[in-house]
Image (cartoon, rainbow, N blue to C red):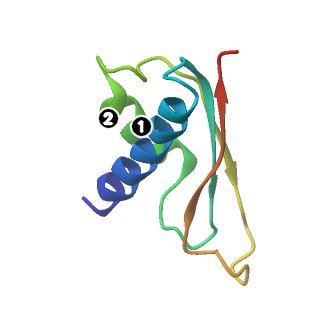
Amino acid sequence: MHEMTLLNDLLKKVREVAKSEQGKRVKSISVWLGAMSHISADHFKEHFDWATKDSDLDGVPLNIETSTDAFHPQAQDILLKSVDIES
């Protein structure tokens, strides 16, 4: 359930970015998973697909970068790196 809370917060940020760009379509999303975020890229993708099914973000490509640095200051975080918006 913790993953869904983090994912919902991330999707809220994505939608805020799209809204700030006059509601243009999101073309792709890039995230960074810290080494200590306790979720694999595959598991995160499963949650993303489930959370976006039949929504405005359904089918949007998700690019996931994973870190192996357990000592990184944000090793426990899941970060939104970028949102590619249709021009």
The N terminus lies in which quarter of the figure? bottom left
- Residue drawn at x 30%, y 63% as measured from the top left: 2
Q: Residue at x 52, y 42 (%)?
A: 42
In this rendered view, identify the residue nearer to me: 64 or 12.
Answer: 12
Give the amino acid at mark 2: Ala
Residue sitting at x 69%, y 82%? 73
Which numbered tag is attached to residue 73? none
- Please tell me how crowded label 1 is: few (under 14), some (14-19), or many (20+) other residues with Cα within 10 Å: many
Return the x and y of residue 17 as percentages of the image width and height.
54, 38
Residue 47 to residue 59: above or below: below
Q: Looking at the picture, does residue 16 appear above or below residue 58?
A: below
Categorize mark 2 by other alpha carbons within 10 Å: few (<14), some (14-19), many (20+).
some
Q: Which of 55 and 17 is in front in this view?
A: 17
Classify residue 87 as left or right of residue 48.
Answer: right
Residues at marks 2 and 1 touching, judged by CB atoms closer than 8 Å: yes
In the rendered view of the protein, which quadrant contains the C terminus? top right
Q: Name the residue under label 1.
A: 48
Check disc 2 and report its element: helix, strand or loop. helix
Q: Say which residue appears at 30% left-offset and 57% top-offset.
A: 5
Query: As drawn, is 85 to the left or to the right of 45?
Result: right
Name the residue nearer the viewer: 61 or 40.
61
Going by the image, does 30 lie left or right of 4? right
Q: Which amino acid does label 1 sit on?
A: Phe
Residue 28: x and y, percent?
62, 26
Which residue in the protein does label 2 denote?
51
